[in-house]
Amino acid sequence: MQMIKDYEMVIGLEVHVELKTETKIFCSCPTTFGAAPNTQTCPVCLGLPGTLPVLNGKVVDYAVKAGLATNCTIAHYSKQDRKNYFYPDLPKAYQISQYDLPLCEHGWLDIETAEGAKRIGITRIHIEEDAGKLVHDDEKGTMIDCNRCGVPLIEIVSEPDIRSAEEAKAYLQKLRAIILYTGVSDCKMNEGSLRCDVNLSVRKKGTEAFGTRTEMKNLNSFQFIVKAIEYEYKRQVEAIEAGEKIIQETRRFDANTGKTYSMRTKENANDYRYFPDPDLPPIKLTEEKIAALQAQIPRLPDARKKEYMEKYGLSAYDGEVLTTDMALADYFEQAAAGTKYPKLVANMLLSEVMRLADGEEDVCRILPERMTALADLSGDSVINSATVKKLIKELWEGDFDVEEKVVREGLAQVSDEAVILEWVQEAIQQNPKSVADYKKGKKAAAKAIVGKVMAVSGGKANPTVVDRLVEAELNQ
């Protein structure tokens, strides 16, 4: 473990994002996900001889929006290049991409870490076409589906500013949120709309020179990205300590074993033999065009987070989590608008609601006005936290009027000290062992008494009053 701690990882990410256009980048074939194999192709996206590509203008608009949202400088003049390499899923043996004159450069975004905010640089964002997809079958062998050929992509290349798997995850979550806010992609990782290549090297702490990097290709889940980084870091450190040389190569991550495996020696830019695509004119953008696209970008996560911190008193972390999902942020604003206790709304969303959603369900399953009512009732000490949790769980299953239910079922919090004292004394009489343990110095034993009081009260006793009276009785 000490050996591992002597090193640090240096990570740069290449994120490929499929753009949400109706047609492909250079032809009129649809981009619908899940169509039958090879049913969304034409001579252009297959690169057959004699065909000419025509750039989809929406692709440029979307790429510029992504660049503006990540603080990039937008090029007034850029071009497209042919990147030459052969893979079975690339029928024409070259990919139309951008090399030395990308559309967007020199951007950044901020993430929240345990040490506070950190800025991650973005080297460039360029447009390119996607390749096809290999489908492996034990009986039929490897087949090629060309539906994805020509689907428009942006590639977002970060600076090597990331130093941990947690930072990589935070960067990707923030980047995904920003792209979703702009509306240029659905970012569905399970459908390949957002996937990531991880470039990772290691070096002794305190040194400036970078080590030899490896690249892990096409990771499409946050969990796999974290596991791949953690394994590859450990592998490289152990190899260096054993006197082995790290080879610049492309590796794949196997989710079943949690390990990375070598695929091929990593290519450099000169291996691709880039040259300007002779069939496509340069892309020229005016200031007026860029300004018009800027005006279409909504309020982004950082602006919302700042507002939540200033207006509602939320922490930077809570603001970051709430704004990661635009639907969640919209929901929070609706629910918080009508209550004196917006922080309670945030707490309920970040704890109980997100636990119930479990990353899958729509948070709007509970009407915003119900969360407003719960915040008011809790903030005014009408109901306690246990009742709040109970009502949220019930609202998740079906809608009802919160205030009416509290009255009808007698769910209001009991704060009368005389009533609670009777419950406390009853609980103490029924739990002599916990009392004895407390007297011996085991202060945690009081929790058993508190739990008994809450059970006797049907969860309606005021927890603050219960804690105070239990402690007072036990210390007599």
Image (cartoon, grey):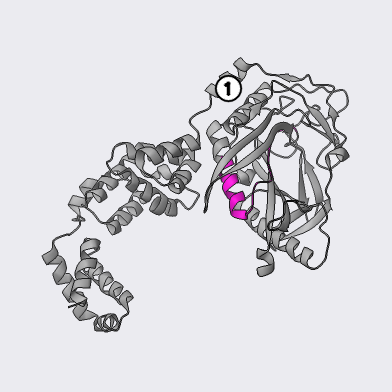
| Residue toward you, 43 or 303 | 303
- Report the label total: 1
Quadrant location of the C terminus?
bottom left
**Relative to 397, is 426 on the left or the right?**
left
The answer to whether 250 is drawn above or below residue 276 in the figure is below
What span is colored magenta in the figure?
150-176
Residue at 82%, 66% (x, y): give it: 243
Residue at 26%, 84% (x, y): give it: 436
Rendered location of residue 403, percent (x, y): 22, 46
Residue at 47%, 34% (x, y): give it: 303
Label 1 Cα neighbours within 10 Å, binned few <14 / some 14-19 / many ≥20 = some
Is residue 85 visible in the rendered image? The answer is no
Is residue 327 visible in the rendered image? The answer is yes
Amino acid type of the residue that numbered disc 1 sits on in the rendered structure? Leu
| Residue toward you, 258 or 200 | 200
Quadrant location of the N terminus?
bottom right
Rendered location of residue 474, percent (x, y): 21, 77
**Relative to 199, is 392 on the left or the right?**
left
Q: Secondary structure at mark 1?
A: helix
The answer to whether 369 is drawn above or below residue 441 in the figure is above
| Residue toward you, 45 or 249 | 249
Rendered location of residue 392, percent (x, y): 34, 52
**Relative to 462, is 368 on the left or the right?**
right
Residue at 27%, 44% (x, y): give it: 373
Q: Quadrant of residue 120?
A: top right
- The residue identified by callout 1 is 293
The answer to whether 32 is drawn above or below residue 395 in the figure is above
Report if residue 88 lies within the magenta region. Answer: no
Q: Quadrant of residue 385?
A: bottom left
